[in-house]
Image (spheres, helix red, strand yellow):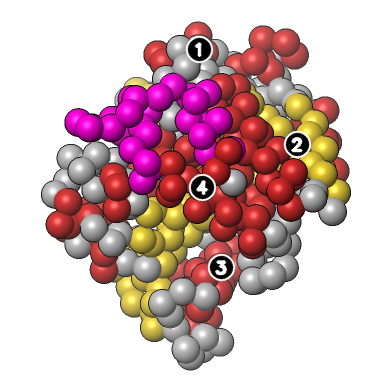
């Protein structure tokens, strides 16, 4: 089959890890007889440099015409000053909103080979394998109003958390669908002991659960969830939560896997149902890591696993996705490691070599 993919390498280590992701995609194309037409576009700081916009119109247009979008990372310390009119991150937020990507799926899987790469005890981590479903186009991130103003007593600022029942329902459904395809347990995370928006969230989750009698729904407060995630990460299977809670908890969870360099993510515009393609944006969880950019040391595995998610969710190519995931596992078993996951007895490799090894294994 022929597929059209928009590729957004972005900033920092973005272009390097994306090159490895595309190398692996090329290996999939050869092995399974597909053609992936890649269209490279700008986003983030590189886009601001060239066009003054973090998300040029041309980029958004191209994304809308493609079957899926791959993005590596945005962010650049040159644009850190909060007083600047535009920031690289604005491009990512505009892309999520512009493409209607309300469902962010972040799997957290601790590979057996890497249980010693984390700061947590191996016996706590072993077997950890869950999926976060984070709401991505609502909540405080897209608050209205979102502003800072001057009062007679000094400055004030606001971003309030608002959710409609429709927004809650569709994201909770994503959680139920994924739970149904796994261990049939869904944890909904909120702050219903304090927040009105969370009380509505919980109510809607309970209402939607009537359509999924085969899935056990439970509710956990966000602070307790933060604690349980590092105490007994193996207790979780599918977790659904709102935007900001999800942002925080997924970074925390990334530490379970030993390195941010290991985790992929998908942001979908629809409710995924197995075997049916859903348009989405696919990106590793990590940022642009400017301090290690251009040095051939960044871990490309998150981007490579992101390619697998794209194959699975947006192209409905399950076999192909599984072959990429398997290849990553094999190469880790062989002892090859980038800097971030290096331990005694392993073989240190750079970004490109890691990509070569995984592509060869596909
Ligand atoms: C993430 C990132 C983004 C977010 C930033 C870069 C805007 O932290 O994808 O989790 O907060 O959503
Ligand atoms: Mg984040």
Whichever of callouts 4 and 2 sits on the residue coming sooner in the sequence is: 2
Residue 287 percent coordinates (x, y) = 46, 29
Q: Earlier in the sequence, mark 3 or mark 4?
A: 3
Q: Secondary structure at mark 1?
A: loop
* Mark number, residue 294: 1
> Residue 298 lies in what quarter of the image?
top left
Mark 4 or 2: in front is: 4
52 drawn magenta: no
Q: CA separation, marks 3 and 2?
A: 24 Å
Measured in 3D between alpha carbons, the distance from the residue under mark 4 to the one under mark 1, in whole angstroms, is 25 Å
Q: Which mark is residue 6?
A: 2
Residues drawn in magenta = 332-359
Residue 70 in view of the camera = no
Q: Nearer the viewer, mark 3 or mark 4?
A: 4
Q: Is residue 337 magenta?
A: yes
* Comparing labels 3 and 2, the label whose residue is closer to the camera: 2
**Residue count near mark 1 (Cα–Cα under 10 Å), binned few <14, some 14–19, many ≥20:** some
Percent coordinates x, y for residue 215 in the rendering: 44, 83
Which of disc 2 and disc 3 is earlier in sequence?
2
Q: Secondary structure at mark 3?
A: helix
- Residue at image coords 57%, 58%: 322
Q: In the shown orientation, is residue 98 left or right of residue 161? A: right
Give the residue at x 64% y 61%. 319
What is the number of the mark on residue 174?
Answer: 3
**In this rendering, position of residue 250 left or right of residue 223:** right
Mark 2 falls on what kind of element? strand
Closer to the eye: label 1 or 2 = 1
Location of residue 132 in the rendering, given as x and y in whole percent from the top left corner: 43, 58
Instruction: Give the class, few, some or many, for how many residues have Cα within 10 Å of label 2's Cα (few <14, many ≥20).
Output: many
Q: Residues within 10 Å of mark 4 (few under 14, many from 20)?
A: many
| Residue picked out by circle 4 | 327
Give the quarter of the figure containing the N terminus: bottom right
């Amino acid at each position: 089959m022929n597929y059209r993919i928009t590729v957004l390498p972005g900033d920092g280590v973005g272009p390097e890890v994306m090159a490895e992701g595309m190398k692996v995609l090329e290996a999939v194309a050869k092995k399974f007889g597909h053609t992936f037409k890649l269209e490279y576009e700008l986003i983030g700081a590189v886009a601001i440099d060239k066009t003054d916009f973090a998300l040029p119109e041309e980029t958004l247009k191209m994304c809308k015409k493609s079957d899926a979008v791959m993005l590596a990372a945005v962010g650049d310390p040159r644009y850190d000053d909060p007083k600047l009119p535009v920031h690289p991150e604005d491009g990512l937020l505009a892309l999520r909103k512009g493409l209607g990507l309300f469902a962010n799926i972040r799997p957290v899987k601790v590979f057996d080979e890497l249980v010693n790469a984390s700061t947590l005890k191996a016996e706590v981590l072993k077997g950890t394998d869950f999926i976060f479903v984070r709401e991505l186009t609502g909540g405080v991130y897209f608050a209205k109003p979102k502003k800072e103003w001057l009062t007679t007593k000094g400055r004030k600022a606001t971003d309030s958390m608002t959710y409609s029942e429709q927004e809650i329902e569709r994201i909770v459904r994503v959680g139920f669908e994924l739970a149904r395809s796994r261990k049939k347990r869904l944890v909904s995370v909120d702050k219903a002991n304090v927040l009105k928006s969370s009380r509505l969230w919980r109510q809607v989750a309970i209402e939607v659960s009537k359509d999924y009698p085969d899935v056990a729904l439970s509710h956990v407060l966000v602070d307790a969830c933060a604690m349980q995630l590092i105490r007994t990460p193996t207790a979780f299977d599918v977790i659904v939560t709102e935007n900001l809670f999800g942002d925080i908890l997924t970074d925390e969870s990334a530490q379970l896997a030993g390195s941010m360099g290991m985790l992929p993510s998908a942001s979908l515009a629809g409710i995924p149902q197995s075997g049916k393609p859903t348009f989405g944006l696919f990106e590793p969880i990590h940022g642009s890591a400017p301090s290690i950019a251009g040095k051939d040391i960044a871990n490309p595995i998150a981007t490579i696993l992101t390619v697998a998610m794209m194959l699975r969710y947006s192209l409905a190519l399950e076999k192909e996705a599984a072959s990429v995931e398997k290849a990553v596992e094999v190469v880790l078993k062989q002892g090859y490691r980038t800097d971030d996951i290096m331990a005694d007895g392993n073989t240190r490799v750079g970004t490109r070599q890691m990509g070569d090894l995984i592509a060869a294994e596909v």
